[in-house]
Amino acid sequence: MVFLTRNLFVRRHWHTSQFFGHETPSYDRVWEKRRIYQQAAHYFGRFRNTKLARRYFTRSLTYQTEGRSIRKRVRKELWDTRIEGSCQELDYNAWYMRDALTRAGVYLDRKVLANIALTEPRTFRAVTEIAATKSMDAPEDGGMGMKKCGPGIDVYSKL
Amino acid sequence: RGLMLSKTFISQNALMNNGIGRYVPQLARVTIKFCKEHGSSQGVRRYIEEEIVDFARKNPATVVYLKPRRHRSPVLVAEFLNGQTYYQSLHMLGSDTVSGFMEIYRGHSGVVYSEQGKYTYSDHPSIQGYWNPTTNKEPASALYKFPRHTSLPQEPTATEMLQQLFNSQQNSDGGAEHFSQGEKDRLETRKQGES
C-alpha cells in the first residue's frame, strides 16, 4: 500500500540554495508571505503581521536603494570632519592638507587619514608635519607660502 | 544578493587555519536519499551508477550513505565536523549537477554561507595606541601651576598699548603741543600714585 495523504498535505517548499542565495520557485504562497514577515519582524505592531508588512517592506527596499549613495556621501563627510578635527589639534588648517600632501607626493585618501588619526596618531602627526612644511615653503620651492603652522616636529631628517 | 543572507565578518566566516599545517576535510558524512523508480531521481541514480564510488574512494575522510526511499524526492544531506547539516534537494537534477553539488560540499568548511560585512580583519588594529585627548599634549602639562606666564611672544593687551602710547607721548613730548597749558596742569595733578 502506498500512503500519499501525508505527502499531499505537506506545504510544498522548494529548497533554497545556501550557496547562491536565490530561492527556487514555490507554489504555496505561504512561503512568499513568510519571507516578507521575516524581513518585517522588527517592525512595530500591526506593521509586522498584516498585509501592511509588504507595503512597508517595499518602502524599506526603496530606502536601501536611496541609501547607497547617501552612505557614501555621509562617510566622506565624516572622514573630512575627523581629519579637520585632528589637524586643528595640531595647529594646521586641514583645508590645505590635500593640496600640500599631493605636492609632497603623499597620496593617502580620506579614509586612511581618518583611520590613522585614530589608530596611529604619531604617523598622522608626521603626515601633518609634512603637509605643514610644504605649506610653509615659498611658492618658488613648490609650496604655498603660509605662515608658521603645524605640530613643529622634526620629520624630514628621519626620512 | 539573497534577502535572507546574514552578515558576518571575516574572523567568523573564514577560519583560515585549515591547510596551513595539515588539511582536514570538513565533510564528515554524505547521505543521499532517492527513489528507485520515480523520474525525479533519474539524475541521482545515474550519478550513483557512474561516479559515486570514485567520489568515495577519493575522499576517505567522508562517509557516503545511500538510502533508497520509495515515493520521496531525492535529497542530499551533508553533515560537517562543526555540526552543521545541509539539506540539498536534487529533485529533477541531472547527474552533472549532482556531481557539482557533491564537489561544493566536499570542499565546504561547514560555516553557514553569509554576506561579508568587511573585507579586512586585524587582531591588532592599533599599533601606536589609540588616540586619547592627552596624546598630542606634552606630559609636563600635567604639572603646570597657574597662573602661567609663557615665554611665547604675545601681542600687547589694549591697556598696555594705551600705556605705551601715553608714555611715548610723555617722553618725547611730541603730544605736548596738542595740549594747552591748562590741560597739562590738570593731567599732571590727575596722575595716580604720584605725590
Image (spheres, grey):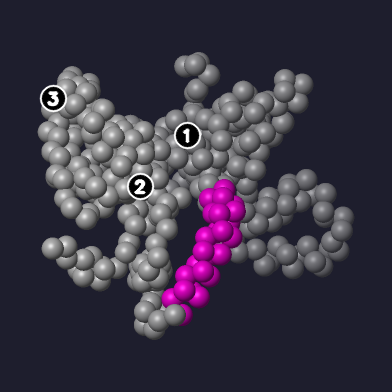
- At a point 49% along the width and 23% down the height, the residue shown is A154
Q: Which residue is mark 1?
A: A124
* Most common SS among magenta residues: helix
Q: Residues within 10 Å of mark 1 (few under 14, many from 20)?
A: many
The chain under label 1 reads A
Residue type at mark 2?
Met
The residue lying furthest to the bottom in this view is A46
- At a point 62% along the width and 37% down the height, the residue shown is A97
Closer to the camera in the image, A32 or B128: A32
Residue B158 in sight: yes
- At a point 61% along the width and 42% down the height, the residue shown is A93
Residue B94 disc label: none
> What is the CA distance from the residue labelled 2 to the residue labelled 3?
28 Å
Q: Which residue is mark 3?
A: B60
Q: Residue A27 colored magenta? A: no
Residue type at mark 1?
Phe
Q: Residues within 10 Å of mark 2 (few under 14, many from 20)?
A: some
Closer to the camera in the image, B78 or B75: B75
